Image (cartoon, grey):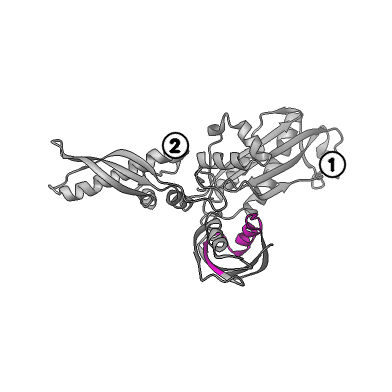
Amino acid sequence: MKTLFVLCIVLLALVAGSAPAAEPDIADVPGEAAIINGDTAAAREMALGDARRHAIEQVLGAYVDSRVILQNELLSADSTFIQLAGAATIQNVYNESEDADGFYRLRALVKVYQNTLTQALDRLAASAIVRINETVLESSGKDVAASIVRAELAKNGFKVVDPTWLVGQDRSLASISAGNMSTARNLGTRYMADVIIVGEVEVTYRRDLGSADIPYIDPALLKGMVACEARADIRAVDPKTGKVITAYASGGRALVGIGPTKAAAADDALRKAGTEAAVYLVENLPKPGGETATIQLTVRGVPTFQIASDLSGVLSRLRGVEGVKMGSYNADATIFTVSYREGEEMLARELAGLTNPTLSVVTVDKGKISVRVEK
């Protein structure tokens, strides 16, 4: 995952299964460019490029929070916009003029293909939403553990969505925590998130503090100190599928924090929970910026060519997949060539999670995966 899942934007028209490709959006937009040294042909081409930029901005704005567009410099950085420009094609140009102020101006009808735009955005960056409910001594509102998780993700190459942008999204995030796939997809699209990290950390007061709880501290130093303990349950959800990528849970083990006051001890427990969760998540989430690998996927037991063709579409929508090519159809062994950013083990895990069709993983080797369609 480069992105990261960016970046993983999943546009609402992209759904799992064998749905037909979405129709392109048609944007009616202006374009302009300065005429330099009398070269109107070059100015016209630049004006068409400006129209493409406006069209992509218009379509993106209908799905994506404008602050996220600015954060990722999707339309202001030329190097980034070049990667998106392939999603927009000029359908018709009208009202062309060479104006007295030295500009070439036009209007254009531009087709913007959401599938292509999605794939381009997927390659740009990895973005994460983090919302962890921290309940401390029966009151909420803390942001200690979540801040540590956000900082660790940022240090490891993720673009983390500003938590202030998520104000008013509590109900949606709670719904995602409960496994609502549709809400995960919608929120992932709005904030271009490749992963949504949700969960809970609960801190309670611990009356008895013994040296066994803090074995590395001289018991004499614990005199007058109080203790709190934290328990955490945090999940990383793929907004494209709504499925859990990885999860951290302290289980029955308490993370003990100490301090001269209950508040200080609670913050210490939260820091420990946040640090432990952050390290676990970074180690188990797909890494941003991973190189694309070519993996040969052999699928056995595909009953018809149509199912094989549908499967090609399903594969192309998996997180981290940049391209799929199907070889000749054979019910015994149909071979797909998959361009994937995250390695064989991660792709095998994604394949095992499919339900339409259901696949069982047979073997995983370097550059090769073999699966079988379940009856």
In the image: residue 127, left or right of residue 282: left
Residue 202 locus on image (x, y percent): 75, 36
Residue 355 locus on image (x, y percent): 65, 54
Q: Which residue is mark 2?
A: 62
**Residue occupying the point 66% across, 66% down:** 372
Residue 32 locus on image (x, y percent): 24, 40
Identify residue type, mark 2. Ala
Circle 2: element type: helix
In which quarter of the view is residue 203 placed? Answer: top right
| Residue 249 magenta-highlighted | no
Circle 1: element type: helix
Residue 222 locus on image (x, y percent): 82, 37
> Which region is colored magenta?
335-358
Nearer-the-camera pick, 215 or 230: 230
| Residue 349 magenta-highlighted | yes
Q: Which residue is mark 1?
A: 219
Nearer-the-camera pick, 227 or 143: 143
In the image: residue 180, left or right of residue 186: right
- The answer to whether residue 282 is above or below residue 207 is below
In this rendering, the count of numbered labels is 2
Disc on res. 200: none
Q: Are marks 1 and 2 in contact (CB under 8 Å)?
A: no
Identify residue type, mark 1. Pro
